[in-house]
Image: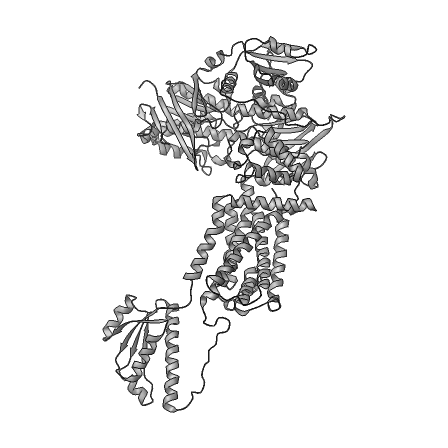
Amino acid sequence: MSFPVEVSDLSKSFKSGARSIQALENVNFKLSRGQVTGLIGPDGAGKTTLMRVLCGLFPIDTGEVKVLGLNATTDAEEVQSKVSYMPQRFGLYEDLSVQENLDLYADLKGLAVEKRAECYQTLMHLTGLAPFTDRLAGKLSGGMKQKLGLACALVVPPELLLLDEPTVGVDPVSRRELWEIVYQQVEETGMTVLLSTAYLDEAERCAEVILLHEGKVINQGSPEQFSEKLQGKTWLIESEQLTPRQLQLALSKRADVVDALIANEGVRVISGSTEVASIRKSFPSSIELKISAVTPIFEDAFISLLKKQGLHEVKTAIARHKEKTENANEVIIEVDNLQRRFGDFIAVNDVSFTVKRGEIFGLLGANGAGKSTTFRMLCGLLPLSAGELSVAGVDLRHAADQARQKVGYMAQKFSLYGNLSVIQNLRFYASAYGLFKEKQKERIEWAIEAFELGDYRQANAKELPLGYKQRLSFAVALMHEPDILFLDEPTSGVDPLARREFWARTNELAESGVTVLVTTHFMDEANYCDRLVIMASGTVLAQGTPLEMKKLAQSDSEVLPTMEEAFIYLIEQQGEDG
Amino acid sequence: MNHSFLLIIALALKEFLALLRDKSSRFVLIGPPIAQLLVFGYAANYDLDNISVAIYNEDPGIASRELVSRIEGSPNINVLYTIEKESEIRPLIDNRDVLLVMHIDSQFSANIAIGESGVVQLLLDGRNSNTAMIALNYLRDIILVLNEEWRYQNLSQAPPAIIEERAWYNENLHSQWFIITGIVGLLTLVVTLIVTALSVAREREQGTFDQLLVTPVHPFYILIGKALPGLLIGLIEGAAIIGLAVWWFDIPLRGSLFALYLGLFLFLLSAVGVGLMISAICITQQQAVLGAFLFLVPAVILSGFATPIANMPDMVQLLTWLDPLKYFLVIIRSVFLEGGGLGLLWPQFWPMVIIALLSLAMAGWLFKHRMY
């Protein structure tokens, strides 16, 4: 029994209607004892299925799964008694208090009553939930819920802890705390942890990483082993003459560039070879490029590995070039002392900002920070409790219907008609935006072409792969060539590749003069924004350009902090002020 | 104008597709109506066809034999046992072998012959009082007829008063004729109400409503787009059940088809209005289904579908004025059985117009004020 988990030749498929979906294919791996292993992969890679197979919740087609020396399929019950599994949405009883939830799991795990007091004390201390033991679990914030879930899973320290995306949608501060709790447990009790995540920066915190893609294990190793392969191929390219967005647009179209990502004032590039002279030469001599080598990180390795898996290039020719108006500084969106109350709960308080034409403007914050509420008010979907706002000169809630013609909207959740086919959805929304006959045909052909939906014309929207659902939503939002685009968490739940694809399209739109307002809880995406506000518990913490934000948090050192570090700094500042 | 028309088509088409491309909602449109039609058409019946009877005849005379043969000859009565001892009565009734036992006194024929009353005792199973009453009525009818004949023969004198029965419109008083015509109203109401009540709630649940509200489409058009499918589906189902009533259940359709369909249209319009009101208030589909039933059950009871409105307390009778089903039931029964037309049924049409206008206006108002 040298490895706590040994998986060999595991395959698992699901039946969905007439089709069969291969969730896991020939999976082989071993977990080492007493360390944190990250299970990383895009959505739909099979992470959750693998987790559930490991704790004996799913039967398998072929192969062998050994967990703590037991067979997970035949000895499922015994495995479950030794393993703690925390699913994505942990089964907290929202109408029970924090204490009652803990009691319940202590009962379920059969923890002796006399041991409870001590155990609770450590857990409450660890999670910082001690002041909230009487609060209903349903009234906790997202981060606190996850911490309570983790505490419940740790009531009896298991030999093996399986955590399925514990940090999704959790604010950066809580994320950091969750990791600390996990590491403390690993050190104290020597438990083995398998943790799946969609955040690539978290991979670096793992001792070992298993990269899963389309049900197959692509690679396993330490994060350093992954990034080592890209040594000498990662660069930061800056230019005085071009904006980072223009630079990225130019770079991402080159065949010898694997990946180009806006970072701070420049573009972070993974080149195909260790040679960058060809990249420099491709730009006209009038443009000065400052190219400096940077250390590769796990995300670089992830992207270059997956791109090799046959991912295609993104078509970005989606924007028609608008006449750049003379008054490029014209204010398009104005928000003044916005407030929204639900009963005595204040979801959004005293939020003010302005957005200029052609800007990408970001609303950054964790789940529950009030981004979506602000957003819904801007789109006219929710009345304001107090304050004023105008979008293209009007309040959409009271404006004439034609005012909405200028606005495109993409909701957080996929919200097109699931029963309707792709083409039926496109047709309907084209009509809704007043496009009929020839014009309609033309725009639908454009949408299918630009978003590469051709293979899915007749497929029901709800059956599309996640990335295609997002493309379809994006196509619908752009159907009528809006001047202003509202994107609510467009990249939530989307894998890093689809996120890149999405941002490539958005950048291009902004370059053509479309104003984009976007919310996100991915801190690194702030780099794509021209300006942004950071929101926390309904109020604006800071606003400005990404660089200004980071400078706020910069200590004496030369190194510019990441957006996430800046965010945490701002949150902590607020805590001290309050 | 042209564009508004195309827009409404697109909106209604979207509703239809969303409804018909989904297996479970397709089933809701077809399954329950068929099941209810069968249940109500065949199972719900006020008529007693096979009254099981045992006869305990102690009298060997002519009069008693005449009575027994009349009873045996009745199409509704089935004489199962002829018994000879009083002790046999109890087990037959206790075991529900027969609904009633007729005991003819040994002096029956003799008494009749001398012009006195002969006594017939009927022992009924009173555990189901409703059925017992109906059975009693059948036997009473037979004895009544016999009485009159004997009196006529013996006294050579006509009885003082004779009841001559003629049931107009439903000549044989088939209760099926009454129930199935009612079903047309009931089923179209259920289907239309559910379809419209769920439509907005479904969109709210799936988030598509927001996506729709940010388009330049005016809420008024959205409302029309939501109303059309309910109306059309109701009309199609109504027509189908009317067809079945005529060709399958052989119920005569004697009156004006135009009046019938105008009535159906107005009725559905008010159902759509109520459905949309429910839809505008509810946030989840579950609430919408509950809301629909909250309206449906009282609407059916108050309509006089099964129990007469005249039996209701005065206050409740006032409430029935708000019930569109009440008016439609009068219309459909009148058109089918009575041969009613527009002129005769006018008093039933205008209240539905008012209900439809009010409920649709109310739905529109709620729609605007509960858009988030």
Q: In the picture, which quadrant includes the C terminus of chain A?
A: top right
- Residue B214: tell me if it is visible: no
Q: Is residue A411 left or right of residue A222?
A: right
In which quadrant of the rendered view does residue A448 lie? top right
**Looking at this view, is B245 or B133 the one in front?**
B245
In which quadrant of the rendered view does residue A361 lie? top right
Residue B107, given in percent of the width and then of the height, sits at: 27, 84
Residue B234, given in percent of the width and then of the height, sits at: 54, 54
- Taking the spot 31% from the left edge, 90% from the top edge, the residue there is B114
- Taking the spot 45% from the left edge, 68% from the top edge, the residue there is B174
Residue A457, given in percent of the width and then of the height, sits at: 55, 35
- Taking the spot 61% from the left edge, 51% from the top edge, the residue there is B363
Instruction: Count numbered badges in the picture.
Output: 0
- Taking the spot 70% from the left edge, 39% from the top edge, the residue there is A402
Above or below, B213 against A235 in this view is below
Above or below, B42 against B165 in this view is above
- Residue A35: tell me if it is visible: yes
Q: Is residue A299 left or right of residue A285?
A: left
Q: Residue furthest bottom?
A: B156
Above or below, B215 against A512 in this view is below
**Looking at this view, is A389 or A527 the one in front?**
A527
Residue A290, given in percent of the width and then of the height, sits at: 64, 10
